[in-house]
Image: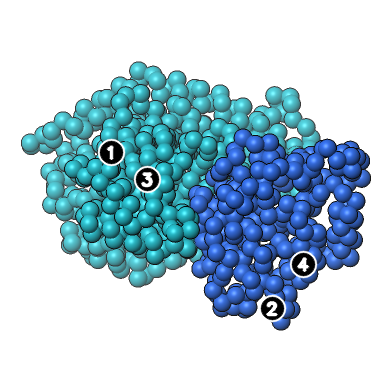
Chain colours: A blue, B cyan
Amino acid sequence: MRIIGVYNIKGGVGKTATAVNLAYLSARDGYRTLVWDLDPQGAASYYFRIKPRIKGGSKNMVRGKQDLDELIKGTDFENLDLLPADFSYRHMDLVLEDAKKPTKQLLNLLRPLSYEYDRVFLDCPPSISLVSENIFRAADILLVPMIPTTLSVRTYKQLLDFFADHKVGGLRMLPFFSMVDRRKSMHRDLLSQLPAVYGELLRTVIPYASDVEKMGIHRAPLGRFASHCPAQHAYERLWKEVQQWL
Amino acid sequence: MTTPELSFTLPDNLSDQDLLEGLGEMFRLEPDNRSGGYRTVYHDSFDWRIYQAGGVLAETHGATSHCLEWRDRKNGALLGTQPLTRTFRRFVRDWKSGEMRERLEPVLEMRAVLPRVELESDVRGYRLLNEDDKTVVRLLLEQSRSRLSGDTGEFRPLGRRLRLLPVRGYDRELAEATTLLMGRFQLRQTAPVMLDEALAAIGRRPGDYSAKLDFQFKPDQRADTVVREIHLFLLDIIEANVGGLIADVDSEFLHDLRVAVRRIRSALNQIPRVFPEEAEPFRSEFAWLGKITGPTRDLDVYLLEFGRYRNSLPEPFRADLDPLRDFLTAHRKVEQRKLVKHLKSARFQKLCAEWRAFLESPPPRSPSASNAARPIREVADRQIRKMFKRVLKEGMALHADSPPAELHELRKSSKKLRYLMEFFQNLYPAKEISPLIKSLKKLLDALGMFQDREVQANKLRQFAHQMEQEGTVQTDTLLAMGMLVDGLLRGQQEAHADFLRRFSMFAAKGNQKILRQLIASTATDQERTE
């Protein structure tokens, strides 16, 4: 089982779209794939037409009273399952804080699923918190979607500083540009300058596309309703690139 | 845990239309993108190891994916999956690293995974939706046909089936659909994995090759009839393995063939006076077959052991050993070519044909061979008794400093005893004979460990000289081989101690008593008092 976190300190950068579309491609390739919607807003759950609710909330889950196994729901796609969000996830930090080894809880919860899934995508809430620290410990790779703006670059730096201060061994950071609008000069400038600064940047660039926004109308990954649109092609390229690190 | 899929056979008089209408009263139905033509190839080793271990391995060609699925053969649950981005690799060790490889490697070991059965399916797929238009169950209507892999003939049809694929977390809806199908439409469930059905359609069954001896003789059967049956089984094993051996699929074809030859030779010698004079020339012919298959097997053994050899050296010296592998591979190629020539020779064909003709001819009504018409139990008792005594005598005479030649003699006798006990094991109560065979096997393993190490050490020295003569070897490689020889000889000392322990376990008074009782039924008074 390989765990892929999709994360950024900043919100609205295309995290959920990335997690949902890459998970769809992973399942299509034949990998048994799970998306864990950790964001209390439950966007990933919504895209998969699954109610953002888990029995007993995050408290029972973290305390081990409710196995993850029983909370998982199958999506409309073969090999692709979802662990739904729950509104109680907004208090997950408090629950984690009470637990023993608070930064390793998510990994411990995922371990029993290791024979059932080949790929697990964690759709993470923004901001740095105990939840995100858990994600850093659990994940093998961390995909960081980044809009090419100065503000985005700044938050990426913050993340790197955080990693420098906290030992997170074995986690590979894979930032990439997301929601790119080539009509904007700032986007174009940063696209040409940043790869020289951040060697880890993936080559694939996800364009800004109205089709991605339409995922909310169709309540499905792009592959279901717009399999030939440029954004979907970009996600396919991204998935190919990410797999080299798995 | 994921709920396993459910499969139902569809009777001829039930149309898809009626079924879908019935389900449509309960769920909204949407056609699924799974509709279309599919091809599945079931893979397994020649001796069906994946199947024997409770699984099936299917290569599926879908509209968008090409992957390898490993499933539980009883309930169809997915145990592992792997996309196939390149051509299928025969040896698990060459697969992409991951859980599937880790878990299947100990099952398959050195055996190649081969395509066994092909399945073509026409599939119509539907999704059963709930009130949120969320898929809660997937349904497939399938019509499949199968044929043996490599066969270019017609596919044979299988029965129509309906499959319900559960969506995790929606068990209630699955149960509702199942109740409808089994209640209103009276459908009967069938195994979700189609391999058995696919094989049955072409008149085969999985596991139809096994080199394991499993005879069902009656104690009063005529000895010559029984021995013919044993030999026919062993000849079948030889012939079954020739194809894979010539095609050089994996090392086990040769191994199984050689074991069969050894058993034949042992049976010819250890069950004497059951065949007429005309069977005599076969002895030397099977000795020839044993001899010509030896060199390739020897090299196979070194190649199979190579990984272990390499890992037994300290890390900095391991790469130095790699030229040895190249040497072994090159020489094996030459030996294999010679072997294939022999197997295609008139002499080998004649041996098989004539031996079969002899074995299949009816036994003489009044045989000249003195044991031929005797009840098999009597003959088996006597031969086992004789060999058991020999093993005890030879084993008891051994001590910590006995020369290797004496251990070798004991190994030969023990192997003869083992074969005899295996041929005739069903004539004795399983509870009593099985532990004896097991204990004997362990003794043989220990003896093998002792002797093989010495043989390997000597052979490695011989290889070193040969490599030097061939003029390509580096000093570092020779040094690494020297370290290997040293390790093997040290291991031999440990094996010696282990052997003595194993022998005393096998020869324990309790075992002797059990065996004496087992074979006492037909002993003469003189034999009993001995």
In the foreground, A81 or B370: A81
> Residue B389: x, y in percent?
33, 57
> Residue B43: x, y in percent?
44, 39
Could you tell me the amino acid type at mark 2?
Val
Q: Pinpoint the chain carrying mark 4.
A: A
Residue at image position (51%, 68%) is A70
Classed neighbour count for the residue bearing mark 3: other residues with Cα under 10 Å, few (<14), some (14–19), many (≥20): many
> Residue B31: x, y in percent?
41, 43
Is residue A226 positioned above or below B358 on the image? below
Residue B140: numbered disc: 3
* Labels 4 and 3 in the same subunit: no
User: Based on the displayed image, in which of its 4 quarters is residue A232 positioned?
Assistant: top right
**CB atoms at circles 4 and 1 under 8 Å apart?**
no
Q: Pinpoint the chain carrying mark 3.
A: B
Residue A133: numbered disc: 4
Report which residue position mark 2 lands on: A95
Q: Secondary structure at mark 2?
A: helix
